Image: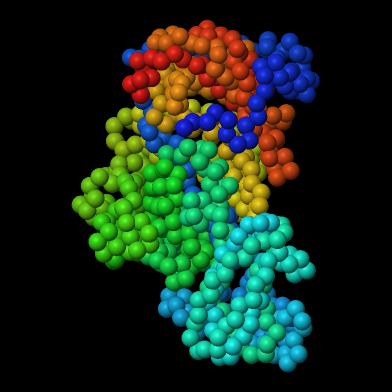
Amino acid sequence: MHDTTHCLSSYKWKPMGFKEASSTTIFCLLLLFCLGCRCLASELVATQAATLKVDASPQSARKIPETLFGIFFEEINHAGAGGIWAELVSNRGFEAGGPHTPSNIDPWSIIGDDSSVFVATDRTSCFSRNNVALRMEVLCDDCPTAGVGIYNPGFWGMNIEDGKAYNLVMYVKSPETTDLTVSLTSSDGLQNLASTTITVSGTSNWTKLEQKLVAKGTNRTSRLQITTNKKGVVWFDQVSLMPEDTYKGHGFRTELISMLLDLKPRFLRFPGGCFVEGDWLRNAFRWRESIGPWEERPGHFGDVWHYWTDDGLGYYEFLQLAEDLGAAPIWVFNNGVSHNDEVDTAAIAPFVKDVLDSLEFARGSADSTWGSVRAAMGHPEPFPVKYVAIGNEDCGKKFYRGNYIKFYNAIRQAYPDIQMISNCDGSSKPLDHPADLYDFHVYTDSKTLFNMKSTFDRTSRSGPKAFVSEYAVWRSDAGRGSLLASLAEAAFLTGLEKNSDIVQMASYAPLFVNDNDRTWNPDAIVFNSWQHYGTPSYWMQTLFRESSGAMLHPITISSSYSGSLAASAITWQDSENSFLRVKVVNFGSDAVSLTISTTGLQASVNALGSTTTVLTSWNVMDENSFSNPNKVAPVKSELSNAAEQMQVTLAPHSFSTFDLALAPSKLVAEM
């Protein structure tokens, strides 16, 4: 991420949202597209012509790294808190208002008025690392029948669905026996979706209460409320509500994780981004404070993106997420540098020790000091952390290089197999310090990114590999996620494929945005409490998911129009079949008649089973939305004329893939 003004930080061919059509339908769609642009039907195939030659011979093929395409998760736009992390209660521990009490308890509110109920935070919690609790005093002798109390609307409303179960956990204490009614209701409290009464025994000690609530109705903007009719005092702390149904029971929203699984990511870079640094070091992400029982995690204010996180989604959960996705974890840690303050290299030793401890937590045996903590959390087997990034976008900072060397030397000695990533760009000149990989970040306009497909053509083949850990088209060309942006990004990725001898990894940014907190536009996946959709940039990435570990073949394009075309060719296979995939981006406004000529194949092409997929739309600035989530989505059809020599039509402003089914071959068998 850059600074706060521009900072971020078995195969199934039919993924969610793909639309299928016959080849005739595709032609009609392209024809209608062209007519919409006020051109003649004949111009769809005659405006421009080009030839694409593919050398598919085994001797010219090169294997793409297994790790080439993955994902980058940053806690931005409420991507985690109020996003993929399924916790429904916002500010569940009442810590968001800060350590000094009384403090603000937003978004909690009272049910009743000041004459009937009074609430304020104090420091009486039983948890030493987060000792703020909420004291509620009921003042009325004759309280309303419905009771008085408190409610929490979650993150812009809780999605409660009929028949589903929700697990409530809360800590309470009261000097007198009190009945509490816990309910899930509509945002105005009038529709009761689930309710139960819990008796709190009179005691000065905190009691953990657990209850399952089963909804008898659906409401997308619900709230959790706790009420009583009895005068007296009750304290609350760590009030949590989680759906019983989460991905593999690990606390993640299933439908959002499904979107990630459809990308087949080979790595997960986490947790930032600027979130790692903080505007100030006091607000940087601290892994130690994000592990252990969730009730004991203090949480912290993410001052870069301006919201509180309770760190229920912590270091352990990120490692678990990577495992669940089948992705290699890439741990980005703070190197003693924030946006506004730094630790002198002479004083960096405690930070180095902290990172070594984090690696022992992930990789240590179950009987090691920190490995035993991981084991106690439910994962006795080590997590395979083999990549770490030493900071984020800190190369120009005063103490970065000195701090970097301290971290590098300590990690290399303790874990010689770990690949270390520098923040300094080595694409145009050699680094002045050791590294296995270097970060390369780019946020720019569509034309610039399209032309950057050749950026790494000029990069030295010696030295560390490139990790394009953040890329995207943004600002006016991107809107909230345009077709135009996705086409430029696709062209850029074909260049990364071509240069994958020195580009080892790449990931789009940002990954998620809660539609209620659009701090950064655009993003790959948009969601609210109950809906979600992929932007064109998300769908574009699904067409690269077979590239990691595939065989890359040289291509050449011949045309006076070639400046608007980008292409690549790979051989890949699923569990049953092998394919030659040719990907072509038409960045121009003219349709193109493209002749694809393939030589050197060690297997015949079978039209049966061959397909083409096209990502395009009526307008290059078209976007998806909750009301029309697949307005810009890939359309798949049969490729009936599939052959080593074939002619196809590229729609204006389109990204097309042509998958030619192959008979079993020695080339594919060696992949």
Identity of the residue drawn at 34% across and 60% down: 374
- Relative to the observer, which residue lies in front, 60 or 422? 60
- In the rendered image of this protein, does residue 36 appear above or below residue 425? above
Where 82 falls versus 621 (above or below)? below
In the figure, residue 435 lies in which quadrant?
A: top left
* Quadrant where the image shows the C terminus: top left
Query: Dividing the picture into quarters, in which one does residue 625 lie?
Result: top right
Left or right position of 39 against 391 = right
* Visible residue check, residue 327: yes
- Using residue 332 as the reference point, say whether residue 171 is left or right of it: right
Q: Residue at x 68, y 66 (%)?
A: 194
Number of numbered markers? 0
In this picture, residue 594 sits left or right of residue 662: right
Q: Nearest the camera: 602 or 622?
A: 602
- Residue 618: percent from the left, percent from the top? 73, 28
Q: Decide if residue 156 is in sight here.
A: no
Q: Is residue 156 above or below residue 561?
A: below
Residue at the bottom extreme, as displayed: 141
The image shows residue 291, relative to residue 329, as above or below, that is below
Residue 623, position in %: x, y? 68, 38
> Measured from the top left, where is residue 148 in percent x and y?
71, 81
